[in-house]
């Protein structure tokens, strides 16, 4: 590593040199020490070099959470390669698009997803290998220049308002700074036992505790996927000290029959992201003696932006918090592009802007989208927020129509494109509505083609075959027309939400 560079490439090898015999990761009944994890990363690094991978090349993965993906990330960091962890919940056409878009030539698959990986790579010219089969195939590593902070490390795909997913490029420096800012608010120590349930296809599966844990030499309990009963058992049996999840995770835990009897005394802090935690759910966890750190972030900010310090958890319920250290935020008049007059002072309401070393490099291959997101030196989040007299920010809604279902971002335009491709659908609009279980879910308002009849259940199945389950509308309402702001103009989505609310009030 170049002296003074803010990279993460040396975190694992330095930790292995310092505490080689300390357990780094527990996974599916086994464990890896820091020495073993670092050796695995070196083996993967050599294998990738033998396969001809060179700095800047993209390596996609399709796997549930696994230690091999952690080793791969550090191998990529050392070799200046770019890791593209794909969401295993996506449908094959979605995965195929992302493989083409990022230009990956290698897809590393978990053994449990080998069939899905082969299906996703059937179109693009992508070689598929099992992560577990990566073995050192060269006696020496190909020499590459030392990594730099500006090197792209991760491409995390996030949907856009156009309906086309975009790959957010996160550099090593982005990951370094966002972990530093998190650590100065929610500290970890080598004695911590960190439970990871968020998928490694999400930015939070890396930069909200997992990498921080390795940096400090903590013990990471890595779960392949979330299971409420197992999580509660792990908390009690393995004396988990901290974890991160979305509100739906904590809801499912609280609803589990074992929740009341589970010993939570080891759990000193939980981190919440993805959406605001409802007051009742927050108080339920606080009443169990668990400190709750609420926050706000987005992939393009790596993701940490705002947090509610624990001492304000009860007095600022519902707030997204104040900025993390090393992160600057501001409010701009919503829909004002030239920022003149620029920013709002004091209490006020506007679009939330972010800047700092955590802000992403841009969208892969999308200079137009990058320019729109990074304007006047700020990241434009598209979120409407209000700042109170104490400097706390409150999220009021999204200037775009994105909604969050179970911690997953869903952009209606993407779902609408699939609905509109059905042979009996003339037009479709999707809006997010409140849901006690998932936070928000989609409701589709569909106009049938002339003479056609829409079978709502069949239409839902049609969407499920083409999109991930969390994007599938929970309800389909067949309508004759859509409310518009002007004749033939933009659909008034607020009116559709009102129509749905009226139907609920009427017992629909």
Image (cartoon, rainbow, N blue to C red):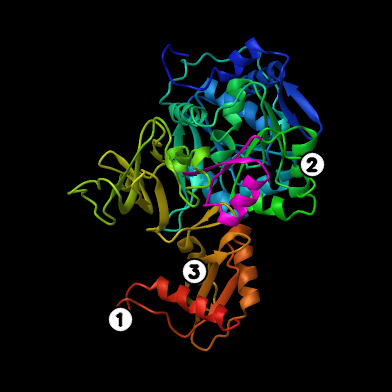
Q: Residue drawn at (24%, 46%), measured in percent from left and top?
A: 343
Residue 310 on image: x %, y %: 53, 38
- The magenta region covers 268-296
Which mark is first along the chain, 2 or 1?
Answer: 2
The crowd level at tag 3 (other Cα within 10 Å; few <14, some 14-19, many 20+) is many
Q: Which of the labelled discs sits on residue 344, or is there none? A: none
Magenta span includes 318 = no
Residue 446 on image: x %, y %: 51, 77
Which mark is first along the chain, 3 or 1?
Answer: 3
Q: Which of the labelled discs sits on residue 430, or is there none? A: 3
The crowd level at tag 2 (other Cα within 10 Å; few <14, some 14-19, many 20+) is some
Kindly check if marks 1 and 3 are in contact, taking CB atoms under 8 A apart as contact. Answer: no
Q: Quadrant of residue 110?
A: top right
Q: In the depicted view, which residue is nearer to us: 302 or 310? A: 310
Q: Which of the labelled discs sits on residue 233, or is there none? A: 2
The vertical placement of 163 against 420, above or below, is: above
Residue 138 on image: x %, y %: 65, 16
Q: Residue drawn at (69%, 27%), measured in percent from left and top?
A: 134
The crowd level at tag 1 (other Cα within 10 Å; few <14, some 14-19, many 20+) is few
Q: Residue drawn at (74%, 43%), measured in percent from left and top?
A: 231
Gap in Å between the C-alphas at discs 1 and 2? Answer: 58 Å
Gap in Å between the C-alphas at discs 2 and 3? Answer: 38 Å
Magenta span includes 295 = yes
Q: Is residue 469 left or right of residue 343?
A: right
Provide the secondary structure element on which disc 3 rests: strand
């Amino acid at each position: 590593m170049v002296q003074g560079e803010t990279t993460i490439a040396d975190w694992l090898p330095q930790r292995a040199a310092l505490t080689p015999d300390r357990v780094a990761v527990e996974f599916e009944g086994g464990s890896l020490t820091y020495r073993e994890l670092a050796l695995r990363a070196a083996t993967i690094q050599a294998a990738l070099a033998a396969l001809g991978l060179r700095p800047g090349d993209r390596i996609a993965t399709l796997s549930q959470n696994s230690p091999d993906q952690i080793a791969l990330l550090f191998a990529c960091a050392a070799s200046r390669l770019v890791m593209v962890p794909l969401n295993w919940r996506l449908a094959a056409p979605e995965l195929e698009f992302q493989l083409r878009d990022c230009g990956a030539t290698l897809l590393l698959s978990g053994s449990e997803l080998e069939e899905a990986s082969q299906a996703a790579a059937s179109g693009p010219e992508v070689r598929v290998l099992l992560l577990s089969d990566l073995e050192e195939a060269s006696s020496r590593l190909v020499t590459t220049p030392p990594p730099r902070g500006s090197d792209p490390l991760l491409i995390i795909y996030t949907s856009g308002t156009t309906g086309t997913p975009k790959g957010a490029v996160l550099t090593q420096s982005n990951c370094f700074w966002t972990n530093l800012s998190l650590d100065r608010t929610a500290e970890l120590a080598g004695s911590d036992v960190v439970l990871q349930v968020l998928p490694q296809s999400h930015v939070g599966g890396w930069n909200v505790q997992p990498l921080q844990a390795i940096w400090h030499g903590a013990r990471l309990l890595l779960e392949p996927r979330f299971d409420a009963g197992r999580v509660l058992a792990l908390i009690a049996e393995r004396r988990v000290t901290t974890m991160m999840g979305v509100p739906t995770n904590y809801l499912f835990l609280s609803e589990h029959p074992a929740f009341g009897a589970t010993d939570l005394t080891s759990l000193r802090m939980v981190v919440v992201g993805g959406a605001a935690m409802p007051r009742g759910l927050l108080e339920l966890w606080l009443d169990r003696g668990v400190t709750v750190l609420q926050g706000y972030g987005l992939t393009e900010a790596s993701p940490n932006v705002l947090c509610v310090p624990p001492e304000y958890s009860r007095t600022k319920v519902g707030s997204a918090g104040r900025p993390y250290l090393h992160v600057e935020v501001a409010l701009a008049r919503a829909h004002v592009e030239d920022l003149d007059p620029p920013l709002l002072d004091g209490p006020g309401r506007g679009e939330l802007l972010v800047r700092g070393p955590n802000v992403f490099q841009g969208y892969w291959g999308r200079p137009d989208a990058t320019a729109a997101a990074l304007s006047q030196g700020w990241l434009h989040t598209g979120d409407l927020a209000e700042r109170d007299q104490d400097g706390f920010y409150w999220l009021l809604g999204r200037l775009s129509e994105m909604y969050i279902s179970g911690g997953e971002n869903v952009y209606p335009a993407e779902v609408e494109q699939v609905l509109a491709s059905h042979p009996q659908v003339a037009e479709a609009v999707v809006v997010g509505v409140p849901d006690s279980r998932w936070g928000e879910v989609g409701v589709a308002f569909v106009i049938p083609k002339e003479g056609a009849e829409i079978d709502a259940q069949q239409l839902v199945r049609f969407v499920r075959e083409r999109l991930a389950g969390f994007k599938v509308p929970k309800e389909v309402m067949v309508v004759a027309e859509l409310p518009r702001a002007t004749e033939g103009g933009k659909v008034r989505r607020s009116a559709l939400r009102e129509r749905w609310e009226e139907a609920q009030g009427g017992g629909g």
